[in-house]
Amino acid sequence: MGFWRNKWFKFALWGGLYLLWVIWLGNYWWLLGLPVIFDLYVTKKVKWAFWRRKEKKGNFTDTLLDWLDAGIFAVVAAMVIKIFWFEAFTIPSPSMEKTLFTGDYLFVSKVAYGPKIPQTPLSVPLVHNSIFGGESYSTLIQNKYRRLKGFGKVKRYDIVVFSFPHGDTVLKQIPQADYYQMVRLNGGDREAIVAAYGPMIVRPKDKKDNYVKRCVAIPGDTLQVIDGAVYVNRKKEPQRNTIQSSYTVVTKGDPINKITLDDMRINPEDAQFDPSLPGYPDISLTAEEAEKFSRFPAVLKIEENIDVYPPDYPDSPLMLFPFDTLRRWTRDNYGPIWIPQAGATVTLDGKNISLYRRIITSYEDNSLEEKDGKFFINGEETTTYTFRQDYYWMMGDNRHNSLDSRYWGFVPEDHIVGTPYLVWFSRDRYRSFPQSIRWNRIFKFVRNI
């Protein structure tokens, strides 16, 4: 086994792996790294660990430098893994409840759809977009969007992690809020919103907050929601026992036993008993759970809450994409809407421009002017627009407790991050330790959920 110690074998092994990585990366300037690998294993002329001095073994300084070496290697390795392979992600909200739980800690696979080359490379290692109350990156260098080869493309009904489309502008005091939604609800007064919750921060595409939803429609699809059921290309989505809606549950006067609700993993925030009903006016349940509720002796009636026009509070035309009054849409009766596809051309008019305005300007970086019913893109009059990239439609499985594409529209292809692969830890925030740990979800593959 002496060949394992042979310097030429080591160079061939690591140089070959590095060469394969460069080919995958597609940027052959990185071939300049091969001489470094050659020197590390063969010639050993350059002292790459320039901070290390020759010390006697066992010296305290030498021990510290050993730890420094290990720390630098760990950070570099973690950065490479984060950029090209996997990234840790936490589920912060119940929008995918029954599929992904609030408090799930995930590893997100970036190779599933291909990792993106960092567009904002000057960033604090292993930090996404903020640190110590400030931004963790510099926009001094901005690369063009480029995605490496992955194992496949986003498929219909995949669970997808993506950059929040409206996350390019955030308010420092409430960074999780939808800035554009707040402006619309405040009559378009941007200055007042910024004065109340600012300052305003503009983030690059790869530094927006990440969301996780289910992709229910892919480029070229036509989607419609009818009485809460999703139809894609006129076909009803496959039945899944994780899809939730909200129900009104009328009881005989008393609340349902708390132990029963806990056993069914009903979110305590949803199970708000209203004695004036009496019952639960807005409780999130799957169809199977709703059937169980209907058989409880304490329940008189259970009915799914379906929004008809005009939308129920807090929804309104100012909340629902595309934020106009031309369409009589609600969260449960929505569309039909066509999902843009790269290379497809649409004719622009006064009825559909609200659907595509943000695509043309923010996602595909054009200027758009509207004068006397005419459209000018990059200063030239036009009646059509050809899309440069694919778009997707994302929705949460918890359909009445999800801010998704119904509220902010299409997700561009360059916003796709990856797909959840593994739940490595899970904690129920409504329970105390150690009962809070969901042991049955730890190290569970998402495809098996």
Image (cartoon, rainbow, N blue to C red):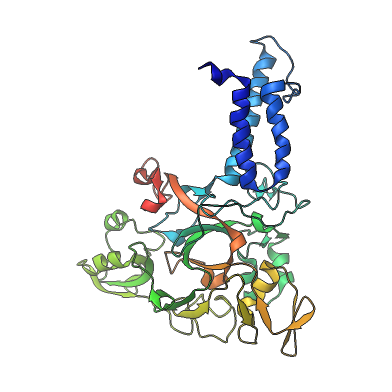
State whether residue 233 is above or below residue 215: below
State whether residue 371 is above or below residue 411: below
- Where is residue 37? Give x, y as percent: 68, 29
State whether residue 5 is above or below residue 433: above
State whether residue 14 is above or below residue 315: above
Q: Quadrant of residue 158?
A: bottom left
- Where is residue 24? Give x, y as percent: 61, 46
Q: Is residue 195 left or right of residue 227?
A: right
- Residue 358 appears in the rendering: yes
Residues 13 and 127: in front is 13
Which residue does the image show at 53% across and 77% down from the upper left? Answer: 338
Residue farthest to the bottom? 372
Residues 175 and 417: in front is 417
Which residue does the image show at 67% across and 11% down from the upper left? Answer: 59
Q: Quadrant of residue 324?
A: bottom right
Which residue does the image show at 68% across and 16% down from the upper left? Answer: 62
- Residue 432 appears in the rendering: no
- Where is residue 189? Give x, y as percent: 71, 74
- Where is residue 251? Give x, y as percent: 27, 71
